[in-house]
């Protein structure tokens, strides 16, 4: 029986409901950044591990071939289509990617249709977990399977990598030079470039003072562009090589597209805030801040302020700063990174 004087059940008032909602919102506001920071820390740790594994692969390659993998193999004759394969293709046997290596035809140009299966089987180690543009195939644009023609409808897909071997401090034109070792002023000064036999002994700055590889945030530097950088199988242009001319993340602070987009694509950048992961020659990975000591950059041309180019192509630049010193193999500089 219900007593006549029993109080009726009381629900929540509107004020109490608003208080509860406010408390829940406050908890979300407090916890969400912590969750995001934890996820970013995990992604950065995976990125660092990727670079370390590639550092080990490069040294294993050296132990077999007595030289670093060539950054940009040169053609012996114009008809030789073996030119242009990347460092990543060279180290496939050393990153537990034997099936991909077996699918790749080393006697052909890296972009031909015959090598499409190998390209689509890109190893996961080549992907930074923060760089979403590298997760899935991307439109390759016209002539993406050169010298094979484009399909009748659509375009060939390509696979990208978030990492980039460092060519040196400047992009020094190579197509017009018949001799692959021609470097009269020492401007091809990184570890992965046209000079086909760079040994560890040639890295006289010391492996701990020399950068082998950096990140590139393709989700940003390729945004709005049809000619994408970062294609993992080849090294023509800025496909996989980068240059230590612009400071880290300089490209991320520019509007896109720009007439100088290829210069920005060829610079180090990262989606990990504040700096960029860099693989050093000794196999360690450091995180130089984007404020690292670097050349002053002309804001209109995206080139070194005060630089000049001679008729023979030699580029006169100011003394190298810390970031540029990292990009050279034999500049005589000591680099002290935190």
Image: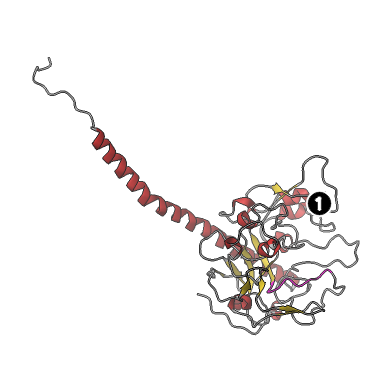
* Direction front: furthest residue: 300
Q: Is residue 112 inside the magenta stretch?
A: no
Report whether residue 281 is seen.
no
**Residue 82 point in image, percent of width and height:** 84, 61
Residue 169 drawn in magenta? yes
Instruction: Pick out the residue farthest to the bottom.
Output: 332
Please state which of residues 150 and 191 is positioned toward the viewer in this rendering.
Answer: 150
> In this image, 197 relative to 219: left or right?
right
Residue at (75, 71) in percent of width and height: 193
Q: Residues within 10 Å of mark 1 (few under 14, many from 20)?
A: some
Compared across the picture, whether 294 is left or right of 188 comes to left
Which image quadrant is residue 251 in? bottom right
What colouring does the structure picture have? secondary structure
Regarding mark 1 in the picture, which secondary structure is present there? loop
Give the labeled residue for mark 1. 143
- Region in magenta: 168-175
The N terminus sits in image quarter: top left
The quarter of the displayed image where residue 197 is located? bottom right
In this view, the residue in front, 331 or 201, is 331
Residue 147 image point, x, y percent:
85, 53
Residue 17: image location, x then y, percent = 27, 36
Q: Is residue 338 above or below residue 242?
A: below
Give residue 65's position: percent from left, percent from top: 75, 70
Q: Is residue 335 above or below residue 35?
A: below
Q: Is residue 269 visible?
A: yes
Q: Is residue 272 left or right of residue 136?
A: left
């Amino acid at each position: 029986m219900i007593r006549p004087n029993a109080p009726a059940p009381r629900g929540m008032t509107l004020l109490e409901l608003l208080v509860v909602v406010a408390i829940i919102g406050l908890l979300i506001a407090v916890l969400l950044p912590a969750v995001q920071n934890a996820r970013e820390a995990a992604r950065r740790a995976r990125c660092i591990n990727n670079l370390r594994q590639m550092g080990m692969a490069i040294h294993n390659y050296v132990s077999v071939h007595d030289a670093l993998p060539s950054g940009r193999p040169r053609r012996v004759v114009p008809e030789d289509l073996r030119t242009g394969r990347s460092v990543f293709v060279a180290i496939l046997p050393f990153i537990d990617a034997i099936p991909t290596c077996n699918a790749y035809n080393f006697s052909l140009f890296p972009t031909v249709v015959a090598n499409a299966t190998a390209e689509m089987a890109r190893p996961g180690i080549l992907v930074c977990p923060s760089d979403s543009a590298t997760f899935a195939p991307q439109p390759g644009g016209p002539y993406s399977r050169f010298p094979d023609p484009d399909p009748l409808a659509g375009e060939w897909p390509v696979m990208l990598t978030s990492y980039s071997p460092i060519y040196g401090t400047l992009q020094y034109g190579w197509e017009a030079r018949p001799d692959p070792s021609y470097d009269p002023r020492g401007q091809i000064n990184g570890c992965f470039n046209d000079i086909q036999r760079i040994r560890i002994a040639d890295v006289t700055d010391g492996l701990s003072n020399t950068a082998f590889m950096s990140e590139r945030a393709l989700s940003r530097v390729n945004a709005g562009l049809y000619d994408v950088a970062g294609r993992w199988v080849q090294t023509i242009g800025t496909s996989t090589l980068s240059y230590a001319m612009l400071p880290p993340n300089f490209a991320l602070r520019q509007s896109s597209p720009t007439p100088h987009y290829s210069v920005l694509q060829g610079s180090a950048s990262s989606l990990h805030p504040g700096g960029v992961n860099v693989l050093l020659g000794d196999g360690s990975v450091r995180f130089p801040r984007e404020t690292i000591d670097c050349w002053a950059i002309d804001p209109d041309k995206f080139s070194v302020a005060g630089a000049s180019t001679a008729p023979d192509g030699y580029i006169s630049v100011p003394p190298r700063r810390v970031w540029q010193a990292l990009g050279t193999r034999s500049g005589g500089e000591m680099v002290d990174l935190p």
